Amino acid sequence: MTVAGSPSTPAARRGRPGYDQQSVLAVAVAAFNRHGYEATSMGMLAEELGISKSAIYHHVPSKGDLLRLALDHALGGLESVLTRPGAMVGAADARLEFVLRGTLAVLTERLPFVTLLLRLRGNTDVEREALERRRTFDREVAALVDAARHEGSIRRDIDPRTTTRLIFGTINSIVEWYRPGGPLTADKLADDVILMVFDGLHRR
């Protein structure tokens, strides 16, 4: 599913022929996910790209800047979901469903970038800043869960912290097993997650 108004991909910065910043970033994110950010050197990236290390600097100033661009792409998509009318207007359970569907759309559309975000350890300033933005997003979703609970549209007999953690746990686990282009489409995945979440939460 494509969410209307999804942010565009990172702006391309032209550099050496055959590559732009976006294509260099895609290779870097794949390498960070495969080897870990700290274990991935600029030399490794240059080898995968088939260019010299100095050529990479025509596209981005440093490895840290590659990480920042990647995390901004993931977080920008998630944060934008919260600014759309569907997340701000209406009953709390409807807003919660809108945000969860939007989150799932960002995850499936930007899977490598969100995977990188979810695997952060907070070892650098860039990572710590990203983790704080992610915690802010999580708190916004938790507030929607709490609002729906107080409205009486979802069950009150489950601890709200447990509810929130289970929702996040379910969605975040998708990066470990979902494969775009497989038999399970992004639309069907979103429908299944929403059905599972709300069938267990809606009052009967």
Image: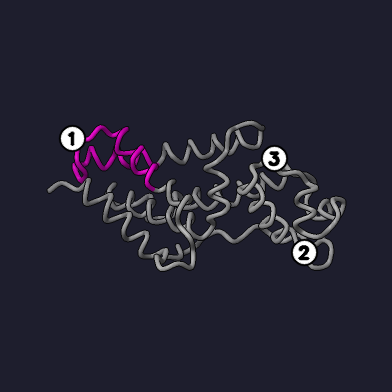
Q: CA distance from mark 2 to mark 1?
A: 55 Å
Indicate which disc, 2 or 3, sits on the residue closer to the N terminus.
2
> What kind of element bears circle 3?
loop
Mark 2, residue position: 19
Question: What is the quadrant of residue 187 in the picture?
Answer: bottom left
The N terminus, quarter of image? bottom left
Q: Amino acid at mark 1?
A: Asp
SS category of the residue bearing label 2: loop
Q: Earlier in the sequence, mark 3 or mark 1?
A: 3
Q: Which mark is residue 157?
A: 1
Q: How many numbered circles are shown?
A: 3
Query: Mark 3 belongs to which amino acid?
Result: Ala
> Does the magenta-highlighted stretch encompass residue 155?
yes
The x and y percentages for residue 64 are 72, 41
Percent position of residue 75, x then y: 55, 47
Q: Residue at x 58, y 46 (%)?
A: 116
Along the line of sight, which residue is nearer the eye, 133 or 168?
168
Relative horizontal placement of residue 92, taking residue 99 as reference (left or right): left
Q: Say which residue appears at 82% left-offset and 61% top-offset.
A: 15
Does 64 appear above or below 30? above
Image spot of residue 150 (x, y percent): 23, 37
Q: CA distance from mark 3 to mark 1?
A: 45 Å
Rendered location of residue 114, percent (x, y)? 53, 49
Highlighted magenta segment, given as a residue range: 141-170
Near mark 3 (Cα within 10 A), the count class, few <14, some 14-19 or many ≥20, is few
Which amino acid lies under the numbered mark 2 shown in the image of this protein? Tyr
Residue at point 80% right, 48% down?
43
Nearer to the camera, 17 or 7:
17
* Element assignment for label 1: loop
Seen from the viewer's position, the closer of residues 36 and 171 is 36
- The numbered disc on residue 39 is 3
